[in-house]
Amino acid sequence: MIGHVLDAGVPAAWVTGDEVYGGDPHLSAELERRQIGYVLAVSRKRAIATRAGVFRAGVLAHGLPKRAWQRLSAGAGAKGHRMYDWAQVDIDSQPSSTGHRWLLIRRNRRTGELAFYRGYSPRPVALTMLVEVAGRRWTVEEAFQAAKGLAGLDEHQVRRWTSWHRWTTMAMLAHAFLAVTAAIERAGATTPSDLVPLTCSEIQRLFAAFVAQPVLDLVHRLRWSEWRRRHQARARTSHYRRQAA
């Protein structure tokens, strides 16, 4: 599927995915052949070839010195930046191969839990870039969850592929409408500092109120929307202040 998308001319500089994709050697080989960078999750038991020998990913992580770790954000969330400790280890490659390969390690700041990724780029890149790509998985998961909650992506009751495809297409179209509307609103209007920008959830709520239900009091519904956004803005500010303390 990724090959079809790239062959169709869709521009893509990076690919990221969970352990299912990180464990597929054909995927990583094809991406490297196409000179497409990737950051794919792998198991802690994954054998990693280094200049010092072959070790499991978990063993390499526990042998890293303190100075090897950097505290970086994997992206902004509703409760502040997703801060983790990150480290990278160069992967030993064949002399005939091109590009650069790394083991990327993420450590939870509170629990110490580790996660592992195998990274590749046709050219040298900074650790911050690998972390940014790894963090894109949260964005993808959030989009799936939003499409399920706002557009009923997972509420089909069909048994055939054609019916499933129709339902999924309509659900994705509905979610695209919400996402595009939110993007247009953010680009074309200045949001007061005490309000969060219009979100897909808020637009869906307003759309349902105006279309699916009789609009008894338009001003009342808009005031409720403003109250929710102001409450969300205060909560977000509180989370960021607590995180920075």
Image (spheres, helix red, strand yellow):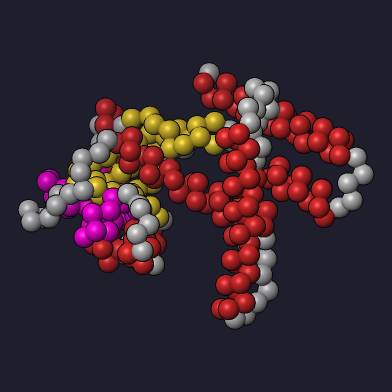
Would residue 47 appear left or right of 116 to someone viewing this image? left
Name the residue located 43 percent from the left edge and 37 percent from the top edge. 74
Which is more toward the observer, 110 or 23? 23
Would residue 171 appear left or right of 67 to someone viewing this image? right
Q: Position of residue 101 (x, y in %)?
A: 21, 48
Q: Position of residue 71 (x, y in %)?
A: 38, 29
Quadrant, the N terminus: bottom left
Q: Is residue 36 magenta?
A: yes
Res 200 quadrant in image: top right
Q: Position of residue 235 (x, y in %)?
A: 66, 28
Q: Residue furthest right?
A: 216
**Extent of the magenta region:** 31-60
Res 224 quadrant in image: top right
Q: Is residue 109 visible?
A: no
Would residue 86 appear left or right of 221 to someone viewing this image? left
Q: Is residue 199 visible?
A: yes
Which is more toward the observer, 27 or 241? 27
Asked if 145 appears above or below 236 in the picture, the reply is below
Asked if 41 appears above or below 154 in the picture, the reply is above
